[in-house]
Each structure stands twice: as structure tokens, then as C-alpha cells.
Image (cartoon, rainbow, N blue to C red):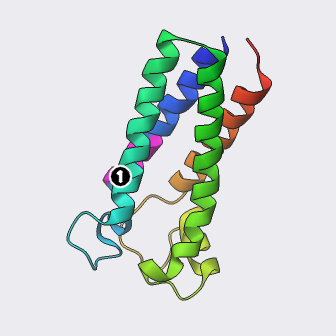
């Protein structure tokens, strides 16, 4: 049962990441300064690929090693998403709090290109829930 729930969590992470990749013009172009695609976009693409691979592996096997790997992945991604705030200067923000407001804000950040607020929050929540499921549920 745990592997199915984890597979569903990773499938949801994959879907949210795809939505971010398609809709976030800031991520694609570094807020309009780079011809598509900016480095952070490729990092998100890589994470989507890992999520999809995780879904496939979980459907095929529910080993405790795989569950531990999924727990690590979810923890890594949650930490990476928060640590991304430290790159605020790379994307033209003057403070970490401004970039955090853009990433984790539920309303549109003034001056930004087209994107869907709240997707980053949803993705973060999915990884935290995935981590909890992978570490707490045993079956």
C-alpha cells in the first residue's frame, strides 16, 4: 500500500513540476533575460524525470531500499527548494525575502512574467508529505 501512495505522491510531483515548466516564463527565461531555457528550468526538468522514474520503480517494486531512496529524494528536494532562495541574486532579486515571496507566495508577484502562484508551494508540500509517508508507513 505504501508504494502505491508514494507512487501517487511522485506522480503528483511530476504533474506539478510539468505545470511549472510549461507555465512559468520567469523560470524559462530568467525573468526575461535569457532566451529559453534558463539553467533552473533544466534542474526542474531533471527533477520531473527523477519523479517519473520513481513512479515506475515504485509500481514495479516496493522494497525498503527503494522506499528509503524515495524518502531521501523527497527530503533532498524539499531542502533544495528552500535553499533555492539563496540564489536570489542570480535571478535579479535584491533580497532573499523577495525571492521567497515570489517562490512561495500565493499571489502574483508584481513585475514578474507569466506564472501560476502556488505551484511551488504545492510541490514543496508534496515532497514533505512524500517524506513523511516514506518514513512513517511501513507496509
Is residue 64 located in the magenta-colored stretch of the structure? Answer: no
Image position, residue 126 (x, y; %): 61, 40
Q: Residue at x 76, y 20 (%)?
A: 137
Which image quarter holds the C terminus? top right
Image position, residue 92 (x, y; %): 44, 84
Q: Magenta residues: mostly which secondary structure?
A: helix
Which image quarter holds the N terminus? top right
Residue 111 visible in rendering: no
Q: Residues within 10 Å of mark 1 (few under 14, many from 20)?
A: many
Residue stretch in magenta: 16-22
Q: Nearer the viewer, residue 32 or 48?
A: 48
Say whether residue 70 is left or right of residue 89: right
Image position, residue 136 (x, y; %): 79, 26
Residue 117 visible in rendering: yes
The residue at which mark 1 appears reads as: 21
In which quarter of the view is residue 6 placed?
top right
Total residue callouts: 1
Is residue 20 located in the magenta-colored stretch of the structure? Answer: yes
Q: Nearer the viewer, residue 58 or 5?
A: 58
In which quarter of the view is residue 65 placed?
top right
Image position, residue 72 (x, y; %): 63, 38
| Farthest bottom residue in view | 94
| Farthest right residue in view | 136
Q: Residue at x 71, y 28 (%)?
A: 133
Vertical comparison of 3 with 18: above or below: above
Q: Nearer the viewer, residue 77 or 119?
A: 77
Say whether residue 74 is left or right of residue 43: right
Amino acid at each position: 500500500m505504501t508504494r502505491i501512495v508514494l507512487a501517487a505522491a511522485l506522480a503528483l510531483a511530476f504533474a506539478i513540476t510539468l505545470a511549472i515548466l510549461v507555465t512559468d516564463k520567469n523560470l524559462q527565461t530568467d525573468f526575461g533575460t535569457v532566451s529559453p531555457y534558463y539553467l533552473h528550468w533544466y534542474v526542474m526538468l531533471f527533477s520531473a524525470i527523477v519523479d517519473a522514474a520513481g513512479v515506475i520503480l515504485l509500481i514495479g517494486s516496493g522494497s525498503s531500499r527503494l522506499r528509503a531512496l524515495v524518502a531521501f529524494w523527497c527530503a533532498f528536494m524539499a531542502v533544495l527548494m528552500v535553499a533555492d532562495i539563496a540564489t536570489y541574486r542570480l535571478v535579479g532579486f535584491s533580497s532573499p525575502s523577495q525571492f521567497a515571496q515570489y517562490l512561495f507566495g500565493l499571489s502574483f508577484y508584481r513585475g514578474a512574467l507569466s506564472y501560476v502562484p502556488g505551484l511551488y508551494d504545492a510541490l514543496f508540500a508534496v515532497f514533505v508529505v512524500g517524506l513523511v509517508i516514506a518514513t512513517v508507513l511501513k507496509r
